[in-house]
Amino acid sequence: MGIVTSFQNILDNIFLPLFEVTVDPESHPQLHIFLKQVVGLNLVDDESKPERRPTKHMPTPAQWTNIFNPAFLYYVYYCYANLYTLNKLRESKGMTTIRFRPHAGEAGDVDHLASTFLTCQNIGHGINLRKSPVLQYLYYLSQIGLAMSPLSNNSLFLDYHRNPLPIFFLRGLNVSLSTDDPLQIHLTKEPRCFKILVLLQTTPLTSIK
């Protein structure tokens, strides 16, 4: 849209104020107070859009000036790298830290889940882990959190009754039920705690052997 001139502009808009307020809380007093309540950084977009796989020949963020959006893995790496450095600085000053928790694995390439396995402590969705038993096992071993949203998935990518949340839960993956736009995406009037019980009951324990 011509609002920014490079991908570096996006990174600067997000992270420069965070570094500034960490070094000197008085530089942005309201942001300093706000960050005490912030626990995570998310990335949200349509993962199903076609994209080029990143390679060692990809331009740096400052050189990324073309009209095409960088790939998911590119976004993940640079957000992770900046957030990791920021968190180390905040830790050294006794400040709260921010977890990297992007939407990942709702659609698109399974490589998205490989990149978040290497960089994240938890993610949103992760339903495409059903396509990769190896990655699913790695997520189980590492207990990377999956905030899953069956109602949202039902509206966009995967039928409600085919959602892998019950399977993941019974296999011991670290799953939780996410609202994900509850005012837009809803199915019944019952509380969500009831819905997850109904969902889990759709897969008998005897079928997970």
Image (cartoon, rainbow, N blue to C red):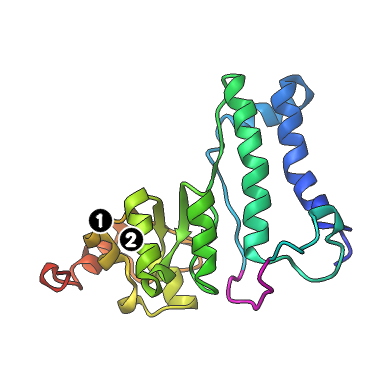
Which quadrant of the rendered structure holds the C terminus? bottom left
Q: Amino acid at mark 2?
A: Tyr
Q: Is residue 176 visible?
A: no
C-alpha distance separating marks 2 and 1? 10 Å
Is the residue 178 above or below the residue 151 in the image?
above
| Mark 2 crowd level (few <14, some 14–19, many ≥20, 10 Å Cα) | some
| Mark 1 crowd level (few <14, some 14–19, many ≥20, 10 Å Cα) | few
Residue 148 - label:
none
Residue 137 - label:
2
Instruction: Tell me which residue sits at (75%, 48%) in the image.
Output: 11
Asked whether 41 or 179 is in front, the reply is: 41
Q: Is residue 192 visible?
A: yes
In this picture, which residue range is highlighted in magenta?
46-54
List x then y, in percent, for residue 139. 38, 56
List x then y, in percent, for residue 149. 41, 64
Is the residue 62 above or below the residue 125 in the image?
above
Q: Is residue 48 magenta?
A: yes
- Secondary structure at numbered mark 1: loop
Residue 172 - label:
1
- In the image as oriented, which residue stretches furthest toward the left? 206
Which sits earlier in the primary sequence, circle 2 or circle 1? 2
List x then y, in percent, for residue 132. 39, 71
Question: Is 184 left, or right, of 194 in this rendering?
Answer: right
Question: Is 195 left, or right, of 8 in this rendering?
Answer: left
